Amino acid sequence: MQGLEVLVKQKFLVEGSQKAKERKVVTQLRFLKSLALIVIITLAIASILWNIPEVRKIGTTILTSAGVIGIIVGVAAQKSIANLITGFQIAFTQPIKIDDKVEIEGEFGIVEDITLTYVVIKTWDLRRLVLPLSYFNDNPFVNWTFNSPELIGSVFFYVDYSFPVNVLRKEFMSLLKSNPLWNKKTADLLVTKVDQLTIEIRTSFSAKNASDIWDLRCTIREQLIEFMQKNHPASLPKIRQMQVFEL
């Protein structure tokens, strides 16, 4: 099992760490390795003890009450058994995989490890969010890389009705073309909403993974704000006030 995991990881590194197929296999192998380790250790200890005559006699006596003990253990270990079943579901239905980018409890991070009882999420600031396996059956969460690492990001701007949208669109496209994080697949700038004070402009663009889309969103936001401040300050959102004078 260890050799298989090493081979898969080598393939993983050669072909790219963002491929869902490789991450799926790594997740399943890691879960099966943990389960196999427990089974092997248990069988090894049982075999050693069974070859000792004194222990074998005690074992024969214990086996006569194994049914009762099994019921007691089963009741006491309900949560552990539920976690084990959930582990099988996660390993083979794949709602999350090793190296998936996820958003959970308001935290963005990477699935670092999946054990028989819990999942470790490494957050952007290198903290570790540890969640029981049952959490992923009972609570919604966002998986940014479920099938494909490619993502579309968006940034919203609110400007005055007098703002020249076409000028901003040209600047937006120019900034994207000069940014290496853009994967050149999706790019759009649209007026998506209006109200009595402002118009809402949405910029959309794509990148190859969650990290790149985050950096690209921050960069585009900062650059377009600077462009608007420098070139069209009079068209930024205004609060209009009408004064009525009584004669």
Image (tube, rainbow, N blue to C red):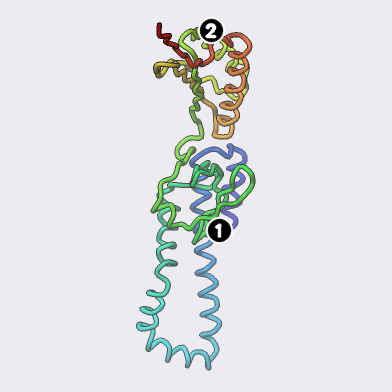
CA distance separating discs 1 and 2: 59 Å
The spot of residue 215 in percent (x, y) is 60, 29
Q: Residues within 10 Å of mark 1 (few under 14, many from 20)?
A: few
> Nearest the camera: 104 or 183?
104
Q: Which of disc 2 and disc 1 is earlier in sequence?
A: 1
Residue 22 visible to an observer of this rendering:
no
Considering the image in quadrants, where does the N terminus appear?
bottom right
> Nearest the camera: 242 or 12?
242
The spot of residue 85 in percent (x, y) is 40, 61
The spot of residue 49 in percent (x, y) is 54, 84
The spot of residue 176 in percent (x, y) is 58, 17
Residues at circles 1 and 2 in contact by the CB criterion of under 8 Å:
no
Which residue is drawn at the image coordinates 51% and 75% (left, top)? 43
Left or right of residue 110: residue 188: left
Left or right of residue 86: residue 5: right
Residue where numbered disc 1 is placed = 1
Residue 52 in which image quadrant: bottom right
Q: Taking 147 as reference, is 128 above or below it?
A: below
Q: Regarding mark 2 in the picture, which secondary structure is present there?
A: helix
Q: Regarding mark 1 in the picture, which secondary structure is present there?
A: loop
Considering the image in quadrants, where does the C terminus appear?
top left
Q: Taking 85 as reference, is 184 above or below it?
A: above
Residue where numbered disc 2 is placed = 167
Q: Taking 8 as reference, is 170 above or below it?
A: above
Q: Which amino acid does the dot numbered 2 rest on?
A: Val
